[in-house]
């Protein structure tokens, strides 16, 4: 796909699709092209090109993967909801149907929701995409095509964003393409990312590879000629090609394995394509007859396919000049799958997948769904995703010879829980290659693993959570403890909530009314009050947080309705409003009852217009205004509380503290100050500290006129690639 050019006309796209969808009507693609072209008509990309170039290029990539018209249509429309005002998922559903709308919705980012950090936004975006993948794998194929074109045009992005986008591509999207077996995209994503992550290393590598290109090409031509003659003699019809290893593959060997460039011999590989599996093994025999095989460098992925559907024979041999080279042998069908992976296998009939074999290949996707609900913390979710799906793999065998793939570093316990939950729970020991080993021993490719179990086992130990590496195993161990001690956790959680309510002088029975508790249950995705008790009892959520939330909701419900006011004439009403405005103008807050009281703002929470607030009478100091969810306010004497409200007409400014954690680089502070100046937000104080891990922590005190202005600032900063986290703090 490196030479991919976007189709410039609808007819070119349709002509490409007719190669593999000759009988299928393409009217849906017609309408999607016209709709997207009109929707993006007034937009341009950073390159200066019309924006529509991007969706039509995404459609080109999807057509190259030979996907169906529904997917191509969704590819054309994939940015409409996110980037075009007035177009919603409902709009897409009305115009193009439920199936296209689901695909577009699955790809759409969650930029319109309010997140506390960039990391949380990334985690929730990944959660949404994975959930959509579980319903329709085409979602991620569209996303990969979208990312590939964005990487091809990354040079137009600001330099500070280039490395961050490239790193995200290398961490998430290239490994995801690998898991799905779409090597045509995976390898190009890796090479493009390398260019921006280590440009010096990339250009040095291209220079080194180019220096002996003529010599290698002559060598490969000689190898191909010898192979073709031998296979013709053996009456094995074939196609033979030579191909260079992609840059990132060579770069990993140099950087990660520490091998100098001169010791990387398999810079080029020869690929043999034949018709049948038996011809693959016959061709392998001819290769080993011509050249000497290097021990331990033969891999049979035909009899033992990779989980991502990849099948091929790999062998490394030594040429007549003493130079090692790799030979790959596969059928034409295997080659199609090797290039397009899941896209080559995906078959639809009235929008539904057929065939159970493919579903089995996607067990890892179901594993994510098993533990993603258990993982509440965003950072833990992203870290677990990288470990479980995107780390290097090891392939081990069950006693009956079945292959199980696990992330590198996985232990026998991970293996046990992969086989079955009960096998893991009743595990008492493990044998690896016939020898009893500690459960903490890391497995290696080729190990035969046998799990020893006992019906008398007392179940998992808490120490097991430190031994297992996969999130699937951790989730199952936690579920065991949660279920095993459910009754105890229910009692403990109920007691903790009662004590917390008593400490705050609150009526627990009033707080636990159905209409109040239902809000909390929905927020945390609990099915019942018992689930809430269990979560509090086992420490998943704090009793203080739950009671504070319930008290706030109860207070909001019980707020008395305004008393009817006797009618007054216009002149008197104007006089009252003028007096009210005069009293409030000094501080921007109205106090119920005595509006002339001195008003000050609590430094613990620094409320600003837009925050829900409450007043607290402080002896000798008037009324202190807190945010209504401020812990200090919630713990205060309730009889000294009084109602306060913001004056919507005031132009008073307020102090707000903002904490920024960012990747340190030259002129970081200058960039942030420039952003503040653009928004006309004065900076009252600034404190910055650079940490050894390459991050900076910046504390700002800003003069803000409203919460809307502050939210807009935080949202704008979160969109910067060098910003790790932005949040508002009390002090």
Image (cartoon, rainbow, N blue to C red):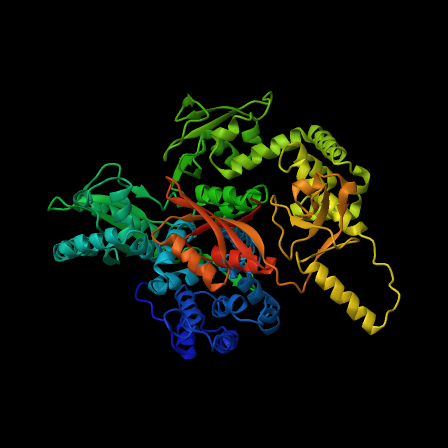
Side of 182 relative to 76 (left or right) = left
Side of 220 relative to 378 (left or right) = left
Out of 235 and 352, give the one closest to the viewer. Answer: 352
**Residue at the (58%, 72%) spot, across then down:** 86
Residue 210: quarter of image: bottom left
Quadrant (top left, top right, bottom left, bottom right) of the C terminus: top right
Q: Is residue 268 above or below residue 650?
A: above
**Residue at the (36%, 35%) spot, across then down:** 445
Residue 475: quarter of image: top right
How far across and down, in percent of the image, does residue 386 sit? 44, 44
How far across and down, in percent of the image, does residue 122 sit? 49, 52
Q: Is residue 457 above or below residue 478?
A: above
How far across and down, in percent of the image, does residue 569 sit? 85, 72
Q: Is residue 252 above or below residue 439?
A: below
| Visible residue check, residue 123 | no
How far across and down, in percent of the image, does residue 526 sit? 68, 43
| Visible residue check, residue 614 | yes
Out of 728 and 384, give the one closest to the viewer. Answer: 728
Out of 57 and 621, give the one closest to the viewer. Answer: 621
């Amino acid at each position: 796909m490196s030479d991919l050019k976007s189709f410039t006309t609808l007819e070119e796209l349709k002509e490409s699709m007719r190669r593999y969808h000759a009988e299928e009507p393409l009217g849906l693609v017609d309408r999607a092209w016209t709709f997207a072209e009109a929707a993006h008509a007034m937009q341009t990309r950073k390159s200066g090109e019309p924006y529509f170039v991007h969706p039509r290029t995404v459609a080109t990539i999807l057509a190259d993967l030979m996907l169906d018209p529904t997917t191509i249509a969704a590819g054309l429309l994939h940015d409409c909801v996110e980037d075009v005002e007035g177009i919603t998922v409902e709009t897409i559903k009305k115009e193009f149907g439920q199936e296209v709308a689901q695909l577009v919705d699955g790809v759409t980012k969650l930029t319109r929701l309010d997140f506390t950090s960039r990391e949380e936004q990334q985690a929730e975006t990944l959660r949404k995409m994975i959930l959509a993948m579980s319903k329709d794998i085409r979602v991620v194929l569209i996303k990969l095509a979208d990312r590939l074109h964005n990487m091809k045009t990354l040079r137009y992005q600001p330099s500070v964003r280039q490395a961050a986008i490239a790193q995200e591509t290398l961490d998430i999207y290239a490994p995801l393409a690998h898991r799905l077996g779409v090597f045509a995209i995976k390898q190009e994503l890796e090479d493009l990312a390398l260019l921006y992550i280590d440009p010096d290393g990339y250009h040095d590598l291209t220079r080194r590879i180019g220096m002996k290109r003529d010599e290698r090409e002559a060598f490969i031509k000689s190898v191909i000629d010898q192979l073709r003659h031998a296979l013709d003699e053996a009456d094995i019809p074939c196609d033979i090609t030579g191909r260079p290893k992609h840059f990132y593959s060579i770069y990993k060997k140099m950087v990660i394995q520490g091998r100098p460039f001169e010791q990387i011999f398999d810079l080029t590989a020869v690929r043999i394509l034949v018709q049948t599996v038996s011809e693959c093994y016959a061709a392998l025999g001819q290769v080993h007859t011509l050249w000497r095989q290097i021990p331990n460098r033969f891999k049979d992925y035909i009899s033992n396919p990779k989980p991502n559907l990849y099948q091929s024979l790999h062998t490394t041999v030594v040429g007549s000049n003493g130079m090692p080279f790799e030979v790959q042998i596969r059928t034409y069908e295997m080659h199609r799958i090797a290039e397009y992976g899941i896209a080559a296998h995906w078959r639809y009939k009235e929008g539904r997948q057929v065939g159970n074999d493919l579903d089995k290949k996607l067990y890892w996707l179901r594993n994510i769904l098993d533990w993603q609900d258990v993982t509440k913390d965003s950072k833990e979710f992203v870290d677990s995703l990288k470990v479980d799906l995107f780390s290097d793999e090891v392939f081990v065998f069950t006693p009956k010879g079945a292959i199980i793939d696990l992330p590198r570093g996985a232990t026998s316990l991970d293996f046990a829980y992969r086989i079955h939950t009960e096998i893991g729970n009743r595990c008492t020991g493990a044998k690896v290659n016939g020898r009893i080993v500690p459960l903490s021993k890391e497995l290696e490719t080729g190990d035969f693993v046998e799990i020893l179990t006992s019906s008398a086992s007392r179940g998992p130990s808490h120490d097991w959570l430190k031994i297992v590496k996969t999130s699937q195993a951790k989730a199952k161990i936690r579920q065991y403890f949660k279920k095993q001690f459910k009754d105890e956790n229910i009692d403990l959680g109920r007691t903790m909530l009662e004590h917390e309510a008593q400490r705050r002088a609150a009526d627990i029975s009033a707080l636990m009314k159905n209409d109040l508790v239902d809000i909390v249950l929905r927020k945390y995705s609990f099915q019942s009050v018992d689930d809430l008790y269990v979560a509090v009892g086992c420490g998943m959520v704090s009793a203080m947080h739950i009671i504070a939330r319930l008290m706030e909701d109860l207070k909001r419900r019980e707020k008395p309705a305004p008393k009817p006011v006797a009618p007054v004439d216009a002149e008197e009403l104007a006089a009252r409003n003028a007096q009210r405005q005069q009293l409030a103008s000094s501080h921007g807050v109205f106090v119920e009852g005595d509006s002339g009281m001195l008003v000050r703002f609590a430094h613990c929470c620094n409320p600003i217009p837009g925050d829900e607030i409450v007043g607290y009478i402080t002896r000798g100091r008037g009324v202190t205004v807190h945010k209504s969810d401020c812990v200090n306010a919630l713990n205060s004497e309730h009889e000294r509380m009084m109602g306060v409200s913001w004056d919507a007409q005031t132009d008073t400014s307020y102090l707000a503290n903002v904490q920024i954690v960012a990747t340190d680089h030259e002129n970081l502070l200058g960039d942030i100050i420039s952003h503040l100046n653009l928004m006309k937000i004065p900076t009252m104080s600034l404190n910055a500290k650079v940490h050894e891990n390459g991050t900076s922590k910046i504390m700002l005190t800003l003069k803000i006129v409203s919460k809307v202005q502050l939210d807009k600032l935080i949202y704008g900063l979160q969109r910067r690639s060098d910003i790790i986290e932005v949040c508002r703090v009390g002090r």
